[in-house]
Image: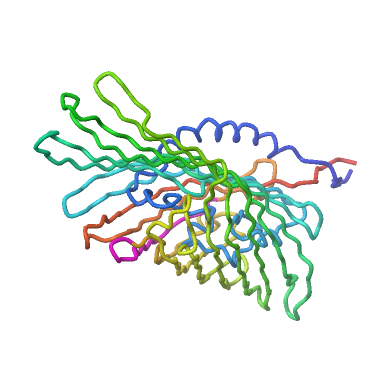
């Protein structure tokens, strides 16, 4: 009797996907209502989400030159070129973000919980790989107010509130047109190209209120500007992976996205509210407005030793001065990100010491953000730590499934020029489930 492999689909992982998707669907509406409580989400499309996936996020956000062999990388579609022709990967993640907001006269703590992303990747042909993902792109959530005494109207409150956010559904495609051998290396070198076809959608609402006491002869006014975004966008990526002698390697990668003029329906409503009545003063609706997301590109390098050490550097930039929100430029400048990260595995093949197979990760990120307020371009920095814990499969001697835990701590903004400083910590739990796409064992 001998054990054979026949090309039949293995349902070990696939049977769990409906349950995980149900958890995502049930959990996401709760998280979507409370994904951010940042005053800086007031500008443009809101607070931009860190869209890196588990392994990359733990390494500071490295993505341009991070091959996707055991974990997803949704930011560079060319990373799927590293994907094995039999692999199938499903990932999802959730986070808890705590922040302390401070200004010259304000001190407030916030807590937000939500789903980070859900995605999967699989081969189509040996040289053609694909992925699917759903993740937030930006979040809006703020509530700011100030009260002044007016001699005729009494205590008058000016309030600014915002809600909503933009999500991204993407389909990744990657091809590997070139593979070749390098003397002294057992692995193949390859060059891969890829693109993300994205549908960007969601509502964003900003409200300005002037609230006057009900016993006054004056009326309160509320003006709400709502943008409902729904359009497609493309971005592209490339990676060159060079295996070297003694299991060393170098990977170069980059991404590019042209500016996207997203079709947007806008609504503008102004109401007057008094004691026992509400009157509509103005209502405008435009089905042909737009939101412009700017050009961006990134470039990076990773290097190290296979199944032992990975280190990398990356640079990103995005021309936010080109962007607009319903025709408004807002307070935006070109952003830049500088990223460094590392991953270390003590002994990936250890059979007796579990902690030696854990993947330990750390990273650093410094950003000049797109926000420019009171003549000051806001900066942000963060440090990350993480670990990837292998999940044992009782039906196999080894598996690439893992539970990843990521801790990020950072600070954005300043106390100068009457601005707000955010100090935050984010704890993320990310699950990677791996299975074989067309393989089943059969006794003969």
Name the residue: 62% across, 74% down. 250
Q: Is residue 306 placed above or below 172 in the rendered structure?
A: below
Measuring from the top left, give residue 91's x and y in whole percent: 60, 46
Residue 267 versus residue 131: which sits nearer the camera?
267
> Which residues are the magenta region?
373-389
Measuring from the top left, give residue 61's x and y in whole percent: 49, 61
Measuring from the top left, give residue 21's x and y in whole percent: 60, 35
Name the residue: 30% across, 54% down. 422
Measuring from the top left, give residue 145's x and y in whole percent: 24, 41
Q: Is residue 440 magenta?
A: no
Quarter of the picture holding the N terminus = top right
Q: Is residue 26 placed above or below 304 in the rendered structure?
A: above
Count how many numbered circles sit on residues in the image: 0
The colour scheme of the drawn protein is rainbow
Q: Is residue 168 left or right of residue 142?
A: right
Q: Is residue 399 placed above or below 375 in the rendered structure?
A: above
Classified by dominant secondary structure, the portion drawn in magenta counts as strand
Name the residue: 21% across, 38% down. 157
Q: Is residue 66 left or right of residue 387?
A: right
Residue 246 versus residue 427: which sits nearer the camera?
427
Residue 173 versus residue 382: which sits nearer the camera?
173
Residue 396 versus residue 342: which sits nearer the camera?
342
Q: Residue furthest top?
A: 276
């Amino acid at each position: 009797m001998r054990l054979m492999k026949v090309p039949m689909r293995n349902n070990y992982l696939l049977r769990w996907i409906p349950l995980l998707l149900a958890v995502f669907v049930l959990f996401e509406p709760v998280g979507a209502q409370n994904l951010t409580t940042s005053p800086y989400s007031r500008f443009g499309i809101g607070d931009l989400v860190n869209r890196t996936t588990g392994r990359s996020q733990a390494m500071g956000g490295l993505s341009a030159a991070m091959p996707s062999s055991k974990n997803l990388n949704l930011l560079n579609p060319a990373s799927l070129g590293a994907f094995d022709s039999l692999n199938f990967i499903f990932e999802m993640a959730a986070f808890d973000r705590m922040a302390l907001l401070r200004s010259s006269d304000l001190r407030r703590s916030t807590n937000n919980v939500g789903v980070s992303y859900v995605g999967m990747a699989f081969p189509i042909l040996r040289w053609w790989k694909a992925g699917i993902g759903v993740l937030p792109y930006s979040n809006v959530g703020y509530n700011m107010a100030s009260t002044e005494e007016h001699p005729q109207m009494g205590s008058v409150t000016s309030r600014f509130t915002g809600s909503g956010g933009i999500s991204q559904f993407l389909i990744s495609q990657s091809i590997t047109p070139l593979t070749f051998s390098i003397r002294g290396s057992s692995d193949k070198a390859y060059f891969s190209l890829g693109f993300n076809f994205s549908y960007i959608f969601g509502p964003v609402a900003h409200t300005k209120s002037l609230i006057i006491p009900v016993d006054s002869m004056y009326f309160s006014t509320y003006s709400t500007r709502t943008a409902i975004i729904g359009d497609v966008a493309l971005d592209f990526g490339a990676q060159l992976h060079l295996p070297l002698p003694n299991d060393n390697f170098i990977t170069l990668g980059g991404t590019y996205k042209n500016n996207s003029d997203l079709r947007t329906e806008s609504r503008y409503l102004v109401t007057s509210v008094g004691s026992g009545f509400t009157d509509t003063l103005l209502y405008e609706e435009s089905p042909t407005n737009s939101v412009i997301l700017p050009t961006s590109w990134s470039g990076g390098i990773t290097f190290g030793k296979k199944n032992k050490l990975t280190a990398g550097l990356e640079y990103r930039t995005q021309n936010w001065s080109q962007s607009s929100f319903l025709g408004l430029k807002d307070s935006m400048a070109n952003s830049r990100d500088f990223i460094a990260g590392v991953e270390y595995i003590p002994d990936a093949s250890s059979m007796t010491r579990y902690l030696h197979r854990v993947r330990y990760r750390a990273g650093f990120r410094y950003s000049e953000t797109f926000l420019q307020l009171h003549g000051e371009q806001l900066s942000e920095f963060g440090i990350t730590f993480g670990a990837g814990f292998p999940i044992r499969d009782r039906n196999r001697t080894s598996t690439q499934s893992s539970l990843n835990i990521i801790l990020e701590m950072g600070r954005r903004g300043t106390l100068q020029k009457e601005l707000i400083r955010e100090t935050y910590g984010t704890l993320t739990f990310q699950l990677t489930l791996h299975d074989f796409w067309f393989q089943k064992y059969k006794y003969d």
